[in-house]
Image (cartoon, grey):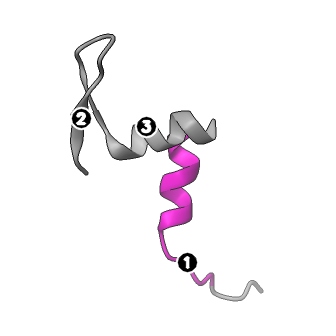
Amino acid sequence: MSLTASPSSGRAHGLLARVCRVWRAARATVYRQRLPSRVEPPGR
């Protein structure tokens, strides 16, 4: 991910962190949606 410096704090943040802040979504949720869905074997 590309890093950009925050104008207020001067710290570097990734693009995903900025998008999550704008969307008001947790980063874990966004990361989970990016992964392909796992195929679970049928239960007994």
The amino acid type found where label 3 is placed reads Arg
Range shown magenta = 25-40
Of label 2 and label 1, which has the lower sequence position?
Answer: 2
Q: Write down the residue under mark 3.
A: 18
Point out residue 11 in the picture as x, y percentages from the top left corner: 24, 19
The residue positioned 40% from the left and 46% from the top of the image is 16
Give, as a three-letter code, the residue at label 2: Thr
* Residue for point 77% across, 86% down: 44
Mark 3 residue element: helix
Q: CA distance from mark 3 to mark 2?
A: 9 Å
Q: Which is in the foreground here, disc 2 or disc 1? A: 2
Residue 38 in the magenta stretch? The answer is yes
Q: Is residue 30 above or below residue 19?
A: below
List x then y, in percent, for residue 20.
Answer: 52, 40
Which residue is outermost to the right? 44
Residue located beneath label 1 in the image: 38
Residue 21 coordinates in the image, percent (x, y): 53, 33
Query: Does the segment drawn in magenta span residue 13?
Result: no
Residue 25 showing in the rendered view: no
- Quick check: marks 3 and 2 in contact, CB under 8 Å? yes
> Between disc 1 and disc 3, whose residue precedes?
3
Q: Would you place residue 13 above or below residue 8 in this image?
A: below
